[in-house]
Image: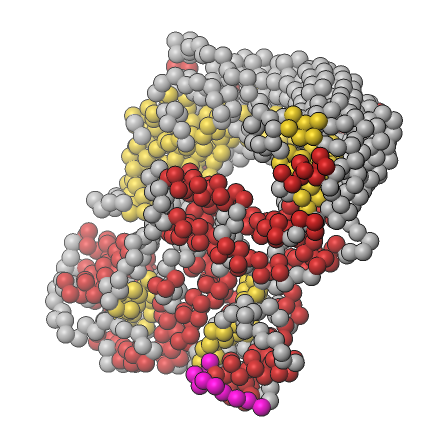
């Protein structure tokens, strides 16, 4: 059985309903049980006024349905009462229908006796069933088996019944408290936060614990803390929520006076005595050392606050102190290592938060989905931003939403800014400068690159980054990351400075004036220049040179408005300290003659008119990244002999570039090289070995004939749409190579050497004629893609590691090596119509574990002895235990399909037992690659799985679905073979008679239109996901009763 909670809110009249046998427990266990619940303020249904009869009364049924928790007290004579057994059926129905919690107590009876209806318990059960129908007995037996598997308290495990009752009542209280008060119903994802916090708080332990909650401003720390206070306060003698500690920090006190003041305020609040006065700092300990208290200190921003209020030795056993702060370093200083960092909600949750405030519902109104998604993205998934912006949009029409969207691009709401700017304003001047430069130039950039950019002898950049991180103003997971709204805070802070004191120029009109009139000064360290909407830009010769401390220059256009005129004097002078030069669509043929690049860390000149950068050799020892992509007129690269720290080089789509300089051999720190779609490229240096190179893109280099091996450390090579004719023998020395993509290379006929480290080999749409036998030695090979290899005739023995083989549209493929020995592989032979009888037999007899296969065919093989037309078939299962099966499904397209992006078709199966319960067994995902037309005719899909332990007679049902309505398939026939033991499984590999006459496809084939010329780069094939077959873990959804 499966339990599922109703999505609609439910009103509970009773907290607990108890199902029991009266003569066993009413005057003993149950009376103490009821008394303990009363003392704990938990309402329990009292059945003493209900007259018991042969059938369960409507009043009792209603009481069960109106109870949050049902406790089943299973005693020796429980099963002697049909009333009790009917109660149990109703309880389990409520568990499934409305998510009722079910708990068990085994009172003088062993759980195994309940499960199996054995011993004295079984005798009582059989006596009751003797006067009932077989159907009634079956339902009761199943319910007892289910409830006997619910872990509960067992009296024989306790030497003190009172202690057991206390434990049960405490567990009930915990379960009732899982759901917070309705004050917090609108906070999406709150329950997950509370579960994690309760785990950290370890409320069952007696020691005093302090737990911190950290995260950026506006993430929801205070809301989580308030929900915890509401949820847990009744478990403590005293509780206190000390809010806005940051604002209550009073100046004018020395350290001792400050602490004394904080303690006075705290004691006044927790003891509910206004105006308390204390004369020493030991007062908290004196008053609360024997009290179990819950203390929440919200928005702490100084370690002195913790020293004054959060000492574990001051409070009684079981006390808990929760501290919320943006500054993780404060917690470390106070020795608080037990912390919960609140993460941003996922995009779905963020959208729901916005909708709660904007529409007063959990999803967007009709016609507003895209607008709501855009607003969610601009708010950066920050709950505070979503709440404030969502509230402002409530009741607004579509035009008003669009206006708000435009406004959010550049202006932050004041209510949001007031909260977020507090962290920025608390920084020292150096850290403020660091914050501003990250906000404007370096958000989401690599950490080492940022440190190189901002390196300063007078500043410790690493220390500054640590401060920003500890205050939750940035994160450093995979790079330097700052929230979108914090970026806006930084930009607004910069713009509020006096124009002559601004370190970073952002306003386009101000920048135009400064460049034309040379009004810049030495204070300026960065320019962010968006030229959108500027009709003409004129730059004076010395305008940039006057900004002697200019280190970061980024020129770009956020919108294509057609105004591209920019006048740059040939003798324009760039400042010497420039570290970032990022100029999109640079209009000149080369950089100025006096340009000096010795301080450059990053050079980006995408979409430029450059034909070359400079003449001669520059000292490029600081350069880490160079991007000249889409510079269609670039004919040559400069001498890179001194660019010994260069890590990224991108010259993709430089269609005039003919050769790479030999100096590229000096780039021993280069890890990524992109020269894709350099259509004129013919010359690449040979005999070089770059020590750090891991990824190289050569896609679209049509004139490239040889397979260049730049480095033995390479991990990925992309050679799609090149003129490569063979794979170089030296590739076998690339011991770290994992991925080779050589798709759409019609000149590639064969290869003989591959490294044993290879995991993915993609030869799709090549004229490869044979796969060498050495492929069986690639014991790490996971994916072999041969889509539309039209000249391939045979497959050799494949490695057992393979999990994906795509041989779709291989129109010449006739043979596969037997046995396949790829039990976990997803074999996709869609539209490979020439597969011979032996090949088909080898595929059918493949003993799959997680694998599956799809190939052309229309007739069910005879070994599938359970068969039927349509999508379901009746099967007879072994009398005991679970078993494995092999299934075959004949599927057919409903209409002609056209080539498009990769698509996924899901083929799933489930078992329906004679009670109408669904048991989901397996799903197979048929993923057609990009450019595929899908199945053209009928195909067989074969897979294995495990049948759960259910009744003997069942219905095996198959269903098919897809992500796109254009993938319209139907199930023609399905068949199942039950493999009950090892002998049957082994015999699965033996000979079977098939009617192969139906595999003739000439009458079914038809022609298709030409394909769109799009880049092929996708995973494809069959992917199988087995469900858990273990009875305690499976999910069985009862959708109907027969």
Along the viewing direction, whichever of 833 and 682 lies nearer the viewer = 682
The residue under the point 55% across, 57% down is: 420
The residue under the point 45% across, 33% down is: 925
Q: Position of residue 116 (x, y in %)?
A: 32, 59
Q: Position of residue 608 (x, y in %)?
A: 69, 25
- In terms of image quadrants, where is residue 337? bottom right
Q: Position of residue 975 (x, y in %)?
A: 35, 29
How is the rendered protein coloured? secondary structure
Is 773 placed left or right of 1029 in the picture?
right
Along the viewing direction, whichever of 591 and 77 lies nearer the viewer = 591
Q: Answer above or below: position of 646 versus 335.
A: above
- In terms of image quadrants, where is residue 696? top right
Q: Answer above or below: position of 22 versus 406.
A: below
Most frequent secondary structure within the magenta stretch: loop
Residue numbers of the magenta segment: 269-279
Q: Position of residue 917 (x, y in %)?
A: 29, 45
Along the viewing direction, whichever of 394 and 103 lies nearer the viewer = 394
Whether residue 597 is in magenta: the answer is no
Q: Answer above or below: position of 297 versus 448.
A: below
- In terms of image quadrants, where is residue 83? bottom left
Residue 175 can be seen in this image: no
The residue under the point 47% across, 36% down is: 1024
The residue under the point 66% across, 52% down is: 498
Is 390 placed left or right of 501 in the picture?
left
Residue 893 can be seen in this image: yes
Along the viewing direction, whichever of 669 and 903 lies nearer the viewer = 669
Q: Answer above or below: position of 299 versus 750.
A: below
Quarter occupied by the C terminus: top left
């Amino acid at each position: 059985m499966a339990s599922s909670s109703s999505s609609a809110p439910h009103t509970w009249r009773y907290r607990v309903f108890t199902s029991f046998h009266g003569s066993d427990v009413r005057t003993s266990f149950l009376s103490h049980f009821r008394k303990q619940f009363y003392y704990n303020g938990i309402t329990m249904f009292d059945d003493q006024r209900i007259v018991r009869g042969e059938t369960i009364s409507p009043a009792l049924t209603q009481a069960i349905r109106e109870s949050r928790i049902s406790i089943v007290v299973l005693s020796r004579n429980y099963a002697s009462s049909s009333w009790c057994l009917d109660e149990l059926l109703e309880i389990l129905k409520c568990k499934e229908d409305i998510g009722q919690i079910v708990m068990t107590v085994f009172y003088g009876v062993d759980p195994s006796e309940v499960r199996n209806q054995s011993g004295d318990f079984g005798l009582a059960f059989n006596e009751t069933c003797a006067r009932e129908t077989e159907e009634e007995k079956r339902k009761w037996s199943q319910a007892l088996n289910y409830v006997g598997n619910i872990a509960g308290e067992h009296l024989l495990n306790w030497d003190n019944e009172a202690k057991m009752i206390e434990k049960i009542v405490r567990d009930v209280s915990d379960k009732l408290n899982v759901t917070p008060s309705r004050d917090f119903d609108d906070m999406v994802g709150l329950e997950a936060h509370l579960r994690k916090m309760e785990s950290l708080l370890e409320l069952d332990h007696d020691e005093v614990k302090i737990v911190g909650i950290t995260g950026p401003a506006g993430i929801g720390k205070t809301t989580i803390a308030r929900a915890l206070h509401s949820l847990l306060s009744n478990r403590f003698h005293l509780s206190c929520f000390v809010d806005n500690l940051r604002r209550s920090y009073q100046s004018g006190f020395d350290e001792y006076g400050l602490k004394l003041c904080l303690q006075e305020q705290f004691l006044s609040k927790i003891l509910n005595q206004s105006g308390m006065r204390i004369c020493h700092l030991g007062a908290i300990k004196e008053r609360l050392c024997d009290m179990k208290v819950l203390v929440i200190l919200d928005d702490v921003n100084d370690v002195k606050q913790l020293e004054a209020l959060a000492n574990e030795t001051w409070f009684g056993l079981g006390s808990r102190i929760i501290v919320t702060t943006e500054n993780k370093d404060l917690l470390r200083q106070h020795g608080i290592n037990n912390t919960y960092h609140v993460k941003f909600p996922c995009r779905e949750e963020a959208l729901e938060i916005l909708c709660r405030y904007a529409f007063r519902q959990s999803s967007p109104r009709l016609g507003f989905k895209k607008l709501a998604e855009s607003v969610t993205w601009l708010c950066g998934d920050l709950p505070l931003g979503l709440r404030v912006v969502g509230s402002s949009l409530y009741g607004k029409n579509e035009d008003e939403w669009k206006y708000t969207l435009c406004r959010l691009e550049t202006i932050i709401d004041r209510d949001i800014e007031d909260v977020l700017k507090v962290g920025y304003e608390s920084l020292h001047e150096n850290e403020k400068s660091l914050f501003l430069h990250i906000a404007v130039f370096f958000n989401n950039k690599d950490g080492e690159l940022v440190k190189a950019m901002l390196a300063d002898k007078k500043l410790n950049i690493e220390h500054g980054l640590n401060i920003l991180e500890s205050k939750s103003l940035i994160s450093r997971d995979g790079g330097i990351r700052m929230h979108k709204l914090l970026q806006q805070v930084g930009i607004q802070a910069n713009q509020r400075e006096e124009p002559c004191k601004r370190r970073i120029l952002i306003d386009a009109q101000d920048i135009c004036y400064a460049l034309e009139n040379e009004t810049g000064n030495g204070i300026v360290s960065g320019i962010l220049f968006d030229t959108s909407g500027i009709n003409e830009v004129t730059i004076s010769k010395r305008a940039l040179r006057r900004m002697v401390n200019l280190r970061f220059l980024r020129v770009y256009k956020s919108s294509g408005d057609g105004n591209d005129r920019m006048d740059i004097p040939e003798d324009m002078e760039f400042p010497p300290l420039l570290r970032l030069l990022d100029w999109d669509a640079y209009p000149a043929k080369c950089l100025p003659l006096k340009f000096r690049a010795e301080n450059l860390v990053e050079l980006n000149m995408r979409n430029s008119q450059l034909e070359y950068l400079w003449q001669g050799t520059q000292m490029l020892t600081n350069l880490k990244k160079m991007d000249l992509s889409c510079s269609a007129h670039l004919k040559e690269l400069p001498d890179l002999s001194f660019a010994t720290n260069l890590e990224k080089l991108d010259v993709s789509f430089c269609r005039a570039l003919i050769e790479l300089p030999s100096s590229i051999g000096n780039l021993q720190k280069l890890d990524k090289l992109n020269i894709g779609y350099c259509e004129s490229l013919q010359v690449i240096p040979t005999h070089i070995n770059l020590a750090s190179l891991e990824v190289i893109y050569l896609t679209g280099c049509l004139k490239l004939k040889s397979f260049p091996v730049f480095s033995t450390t390479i991990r990925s090579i992309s050679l799609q749409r090149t003129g490569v004719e063979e794979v170089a023998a030296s590739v076998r020395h690339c011991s770290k190579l994992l991925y080779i993509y050589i798709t759409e290379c019609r000149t590639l006929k064969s290869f003989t050497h591959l490294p044993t480290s290879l995991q993915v080999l993609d030869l799709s749409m090549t004229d490869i004629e044979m796969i060498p036998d050495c492929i069986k030695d690639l014991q790490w090979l996971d994916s072999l893609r041969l889509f539309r290899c039209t000249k391939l005739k045979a497959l050799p023995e494949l490695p057992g590691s393979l999990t994906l083989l795509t041989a779709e549209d291989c129109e010449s493929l006739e043979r596969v090596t037997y046995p396949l020995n790829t039990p976990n592989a997803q074999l996709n032979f869609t539209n490979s119509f020439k597969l011979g009888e032996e090949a088909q037999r080898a595929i059918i007899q493949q003993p799959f574990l997680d694998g599956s296969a799809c190939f052309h065919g229309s007739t069910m093989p005879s070994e599938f002895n359970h068969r039927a037309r349509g999508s379901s078939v009746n099967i007879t299962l072994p009398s005991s235990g679970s078993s494995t099966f092999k299934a075959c499904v004949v599927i057919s397209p409903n209409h002609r399909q056209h080539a498009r992006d990769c698509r996924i078709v899901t083929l799933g199966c489930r078992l329906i037992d004679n009670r109408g319960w669904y048991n989901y067994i397996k799903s197979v995902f048929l993923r057609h690659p990009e450019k595929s037309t899908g199945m053209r005719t009928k195909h067989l899909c074969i897979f294995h799985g495990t049948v759960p332990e259910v009744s003997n007679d069942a219905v095996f049902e198959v269903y098919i679905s897809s992500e796109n309505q254009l993938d319209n398939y139907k199930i023609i026939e399905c068949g199942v073979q039950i493999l009950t033991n090892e002998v049957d499984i082994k015999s699965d590999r033996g000979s079977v008679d098939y009617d192969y006459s139906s595999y003739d496809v000439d009458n079914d084939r038809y022609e298709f239109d030409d394909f769109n010329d799009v880049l092929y780069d996708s995973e494809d094939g069959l992917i199988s996901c087995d469900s858990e077959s273990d009875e305690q873990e499976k999910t069985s959804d009862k959708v109907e009763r027969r």
